[in-house]
Image (cartoon, helix red, strand yellow):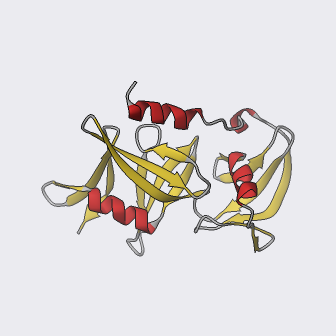
Amino acid sequence: MTDINKLAQQLEDESLPPVEKWNPDYCGDIDMVIKRDGSWHYMGTPIGRKKLVKLFSNVIRKDDDKYYLVTPVEKIGITVEDAPFLAVLMDVEQQNGTQQLIFTDNVGNRFIAGNDHPIRVKVDPNTQEPSPYIRVRRNLDALISRNVFYQMVELADQQTTNDSTELTIKSLGETFSLGRVN
């Protein structure tokens, strides 16, 4: 097994509770908000204990368009302003001529962009501002921080078609669009 395959397997093996298998009763919403900057707030106050935030992040689930903290006996609604995670670091490694983009989010999850962790960019129709995301797990995404997105743009290739140029980036043999260049 190659080093990258070992790393990918190690990252995938990190134990997470099987929240998608739990179906407890809905207990209502609480005043907990995950801000766009990745910070967690309870009743308007930032949660400063990183271990507590990590614990909560392990039991978050998204059903339809709503986020919940789920245990085997409770399901509590919370508010997420954008995405529940923020990708804050990106390492680039080459293995046998293949580029791997290894991301770390604000709670310490590590994952390699690829088929299981795709990158997508949503463009605001009014401002044309890009919002890049990467899948962390299940149907939960991380907003890619601005500095990491700039790092990605620097690594990107330009693909020109008849009337436009698109920036693309590769990881684990997958190609992801970062958007069009005007």
Of residue 127 and residue 117, the one placed in the foreground of this image is 117
- Asked if residue 8 is positioned above or below residue 170 in the image, the reply reads above
Farthest residue to the top: give it.
1
Q: Is 170 positioned to the left or the right of 87 in the image?
A: left
Residue at 42% in and 67% down:
147
Residue at 55% in and 55% down:
105
How far from the left and from the top, in percent, is residue 148? 42, 62
Q: Is any atom of residue 123 visible in this view?
A: no
Of residue 152 and residue 160, the one placed in the foreground of this image is 152
- What quarter of the picture does the C terminus occupy? bottom left
Farthest residue to the front: give it.
3
Corner quadrant of residue 71: top right
How far from the left and from the top, in percent, is residue 132? 43, 59
Q: Is any atom of residue 11 visible in this view?
A: yes
Residue at 74% in and 50% down:
55
Q: Is 111 positioned to the left or the right of 154 in the image?
A: right
Residue at 40% in and 24% down:
1
How far from the left and from the top, in percent, is residue 61? 68, 46
How far from the left and from the top, in percent, is residue 77? 77, 55
Of residue 83 and residue 40, the one placed in the foreground of this image is 40
